[in-house]
């Protein structure tokens, strides 16, 4: 899982963030589950054949959540979302899309950057003050990536815990 490895590498260093500007109905439970002040975002739409494939959550001052969605093999494509605390002025570097020059765009109504190289496409934006989101994809079209990003939704209380328990690790 090349892209999952890229997310793990980004998680090990400084990360981007994602917290929702929308409140989940069960926000109190979501906050307890993630240790954050707002719910994390999860996929609201996935390309055909995609499902959650990996999850990593780091608790602490810079709580970071990485989720990777993909097909049955990495050749089927993958989309990873990295969510961690950060400021709007941190938007710009796309470490998993190193060979592409970030270009300005708008994502979910927010100032953002996008990049695409031969293997990966990425988007990064500040979802709200103090919350930066990075999405990196391989093997999906630009329209699929845009649809994924626009369909992100606040996680329910049990989703993060279940994802980490079934597909990953926490520290």
Image (cartoon, rainbow, N blue to C red):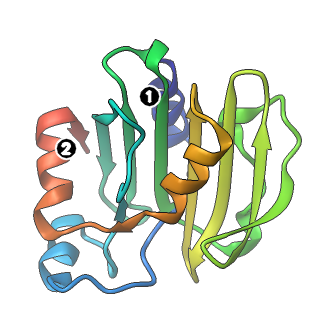
| Count of numbered labels shown in the rendering | 2
Compared across the picture, whether 50 is left or right of 158 comes to right
* Residue bearing the label numbered 2: 164
* Residue bearing the label numbered 1: 4
Residue 160 spot, x, y in % from top left:
21, 56
Q: Is the N terminus in the top left, top right, bottom left or bottom right quadrant?
A: top left
SS of the residue under disc 1: helix
- Is residue 127 visible to us here? yes
Compared with residue 5, is residue 41 higher up or lower down, i.e. above or below? below
Q: Earlier in the sequence, mark 1 or mark 2?
A: 1
Say which residue appears at 19% left-offset and 73% top-offset: 30
Q: Residues within 10 Å of mark 2 (few under 14, many from 20)?
A: some
Compared across the picture, whether 15 is left or right of 21 comes to right
Compared with residue 143, is residue 125 higher up or lower down, i.e. above or below? below
Comparing 44 with 92, the one in front is 44
Say which residue appears at 53% left-offset and 55% top-offset: 147
Compared with residue 61, is residue 142 higher up or lower down, i.e. above or below? above
Residue 27 spot, x, y in % from top left:
20, 83
Residue 158 spot, x, y in % from top left:
10, 62
SS of the residue under disc 2: helix
Say which residue appears at 26% left-offset and 66% top-offset: 155
Splitting the image into 4 quarters, where does residue 92 fall? bottom right
């Amino acid at each position: 899982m090349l892209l999952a490895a890229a997310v793990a590498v980004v998680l090990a260093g400084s990360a981007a963030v994602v917290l929702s500007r929308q409140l989940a109905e069960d926000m109190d439970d979501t906050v307890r589950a993630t240790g954050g002040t707002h719910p994390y975002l999860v996929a609201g739409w996935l390309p055909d054949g995609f499902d959650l494939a990996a999850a990593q959550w780091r608790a602490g001052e810079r709580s970071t959540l990485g989720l990777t969605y993909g097909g049955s093999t990495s050749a089927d494509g993958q989309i990873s979302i990295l969510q961690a605390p950060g400021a709007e002025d941190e938007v710009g570097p796309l470490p998993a899309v190193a060979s592409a020059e970030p270009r300005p765009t708008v994502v979910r109504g927010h100032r953002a950057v996008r990049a695409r190289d031969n293997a990966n496409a990425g988007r990064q934006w500040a979802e709200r003050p103090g919350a930066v989101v990075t999405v990196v994809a391989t093997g999906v079209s630009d329209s699929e990536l845009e649809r994924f990003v626009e369909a992100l939704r606040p996680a329910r209380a049990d989703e993060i815990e279940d994802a980490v328990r079934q597909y990953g690790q926490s520290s």
